[in-house]
């Protein structure tokens, strides 16, 4: 069996913090599981130093998942391992205030001939047809109308 590339050695402050997170039970389950994995993987003087296979079996994870938690701890530290990483991408908004108002005006208007009411896809197609936007997803229409209702 190859030697572990990433070793977890927790300080007493880190251990206390992890135990506090678990003890309160207020954290999301995934964060609690990561905290428990770190506590069992601790190879410091106070830690049990369980092997990855045993940790994986105890918490119903893959051994690769346990190894990933070890790696993240060594690279990102305690907070970066336990807490969820925020997404690093941002999206431009398709609809500003004026375009949203136009969408709402259109949705409140008379439905097209042969229809009893507007569908999300019809609304998105009509917005493109009128030249208000270049492209528009029905999901964007749904989110916008849900937000304003």
Image (cartoon, rainbow, N blue to C red):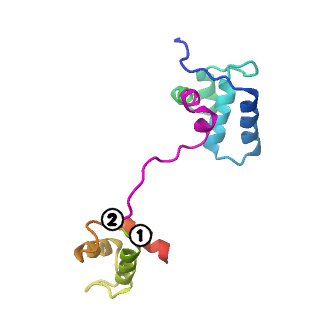
Residue 39 rendering spot, x and y as whole percentages: 69, 29
Q: Which residue is mark 1?
A: 142
Residue 134 rendering spot, x and y as whole percentages: 25, 67
In magenta segment, residue 75: yes
Question: Disc 1, disc 2: CB below 8 Å?
Answer: no
| Picture quadrant where residue 82 is located | top right
Q: How busy is the neighbourhood of tag 1: few (under 14 within 10 Å), some, or many (20 plus)?
A: some
- Cα distance in 3D space between marks 1 and 2: 9 Å
State the extent of the magenta-drawn residues as a range.
Answer: 69-94
Residue 120 rendering spot, x and y as whole percentages: 35, 72
Q: Secondary structure at mark 1?
A: helix
| Picture quadrant where residue 49 is located | top right
Q: Up-down: is 148 above or below 71?
A: below
> Closer to the N terminus: mark 1 or mark 2?
2
Residue 53 rendering spot, x and y as whole percentages: 59, 22
Q: Which residue is mark 2?
A: 137
In magenta segment, residue 118: no
Residue name at image x 64 percent, y 44 percent:
29
| 99 sits to left or right of 23 | left
Q: Up-down: is 104 above or below 87?
A: below
Q: How busy is the neighbourhood of tag 2: few (under 14 within 10 Å), some, or many (20 plus)?
A: some
Viewer-side residue, 55 vs 21: 21
């Amino acid at each position: 069996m190859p030697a572990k590339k990433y070793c977890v050695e927790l300080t007493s402050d880190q251990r206390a913090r992890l135990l506090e997170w678990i003890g309160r039970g207020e954290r999301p389950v995934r964060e609690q599981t990561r905290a428990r994995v770190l506590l069992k993987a601790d190879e410091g003087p106070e830690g049990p130093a369980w092997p990855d296979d045993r940790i994986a079996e105890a918490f119903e994870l893959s051994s690769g998942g346990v190894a990933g938690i070890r790696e993240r701890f060594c690279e990102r530290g305690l907070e970066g391992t336990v807490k969820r990483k925020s997404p690093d991408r941002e999206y431009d908004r398709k609809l500003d205030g004026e375009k949203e108002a136009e969408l709402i005006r259109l949705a409140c208007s008379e439905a097209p001939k042969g229809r009893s009411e507007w569908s999300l896809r019809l609304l998105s197609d009509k917005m493109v047809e009128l030249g208000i936007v270049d492209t528009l997803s029905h999901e964007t229409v749904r989110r916008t109308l849900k937000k304003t209702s």
